[in-house]
Image (cartoon, grey):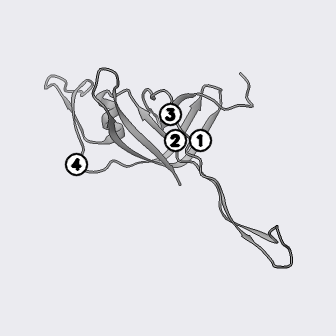
């Protein structure tokens, strides 16, 4: 593999949790260009005499998770899991109840790429919601935005 190029999402990780399957074509780095202020002078037409940086560029990746098992619903959206009475060790959930308050997943994230590189995000916050359609041609999904601080 050529290490001069970044391509392909291999895995999205939050601490020790690996986010499930990502919908093809849904991952976008969400790049924001840096901002600056140009100072012009009457004596120097056509070009600024000073450029003052205002903010660095940034990223806010967006992606859709399509692997909607109960564990992923619980981890990414919050809420509570349900188990059979016999499952005293709570290993195999049989249902999920939607949350009544927002879930907060902030901290270190890692984007492992197919190209062999990783993008480390030391302080990211996940914002997510249940979306998509329930049809025979599309799956429901968790629409995610990873805000980078």
Residue at 37% of width from left, 49% of height from top? 104
Measured in 3D between alpha carbons, the distance from the residue under mark 2 to the one under mark 1, in whole angstroms, is 6 Å
Left or right: 54 in relation to 18: right
User: Does 139 appear above or below 76?
Assistant: above
Q: Which mark is residue 109?
A: 2
Residue 100 bears which disc, if any? 4
31 vs 145, left or right, is: right
10 Å neighbourhood of mark 3: few (<14), some, or many (≥20)?
A: many
Q: Residues within 10 Å of mark 2 (few under 14, many from 20)?
A: many
Cβ atoms at labels 4 and 3 below 8 Å apart? no
Quarter residue 43 falls in: bottom right
Judging from the image, what secondary structure is the residue with disc 1 in? strand
Asked if disc 2 and disc 1 are in contact, CB closer than 8 Å, the reply is yes
- The residue where tag 3 is placed is 12
Give the numbered dot on residue 120.
Answer: 1
Residues at discs 4 and 2 in contact (Cβ within 8 Å): no
Q: Check the image and report above or below for 120 versus 67.
A: below
Element assignment for label 3: strand
* Alpha-carbon span between mark 4 and mark 3: 26 Å
Contact (CB < 8 A) between labels 3 and 2? yes
| Residue 1, image x, y percentages | 71, 21
Gap between marks 3 and 2, in whole Å? 7 Å
Report how far apart the C-alphas of labels 4 and 2 lie in the structure.
25 Å
Residue 149: percent from left, percent from top: 53, 55
């Amino acid at each position: 593999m050529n290490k001069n190029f970044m391509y392909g999402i291999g895995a999205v990780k939050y601490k020790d949790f690996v986010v499930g399957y990502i919908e093809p074509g849904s991952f976008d780095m969400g790049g924001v260009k840096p901002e600056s202020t140009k100072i012009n002078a009457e004596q120097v037409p056509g070009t600024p005499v000073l450029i003052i940086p205002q903010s660095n560029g940034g990223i806010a990746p967006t992606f859709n998770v399509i692997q909607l098992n109960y564990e992923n619903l619980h981890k990414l959206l919050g809420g509570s899991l349900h188990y059979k009475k016999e499952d005293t060790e709570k290993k195999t959930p049989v249902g999920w109840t939607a949350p009544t308050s927002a879930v907060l997943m902030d901290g270190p994230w890692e984007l492992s790429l197919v190209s062999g590189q990783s993008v480390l995000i030391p302080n990211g916050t996940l914002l997510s919601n249940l979306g998509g359609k329930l049809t025979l041609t599309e799956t429901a999904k968790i629409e995610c935005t990873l805000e980078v601080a």
